[in-house]
Amino acid sequence: FKAFNTVARSIQNHYDTILNYFDNRSTNASAESFNAKIKAFRAQFRGVRNVEFFLYRLTQLYA
């Protein structure tokens, strides 16, 4: 029953967010897509140590 309790607790903790989809038909797909783009960008430019330059390039590509 430990796994069931974990699932039940997760549903209880995120109840409002889960129902948000049914109320507003909104998901976090756009945020997940943007995160995937950032991850791919970071993999392409691995080794960049200048955070300001990294953020500048992100804004130039995806803003």
Image (tube, grey):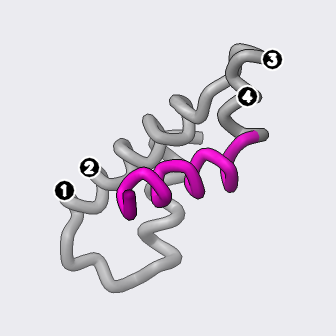
- The amino acid on which the numbered mark 1 sits, given as a three-letter code, is Gln
5 relative position to 38: left or right = right
Identified at 47% across, 59% down, the residue is: 6
Residue beneath label 3, please?
23
Q: CA distance from mark 1 to mark 3?
A: 39 Å
Tell us which disc is closer to us: 1 or 3.
Answer: 3
Identified at 72% across, 42% down, the residue is: 15
Q: Nearer the viewer, residue 10 or 59?
A: 10
- Dot 1 lies on which element? helix
The answer to the question of whether label 3 and label 4 lie on touching residues, with beta carbons closer than 8 A, is yes
Identified at 55% across, 40% down, the residue is: 31
Residue 26 picture quarter: top right
Read off the magenta span: 1-15
- The amino acid on which the numbered mark 4 sits, given as a three-letter code, is Leu
Residue 53 lies, with reference to residue 23, above or below; the image says below
Residue beneath label 4, please?
19
Q: Which mark is residue 40?
A: 2
- The amino acid on which the numbered mark 3 sits, given as a three-letter code, is Asp
Q: CA distance from mark 4 to mark 1?
A: 37 Å
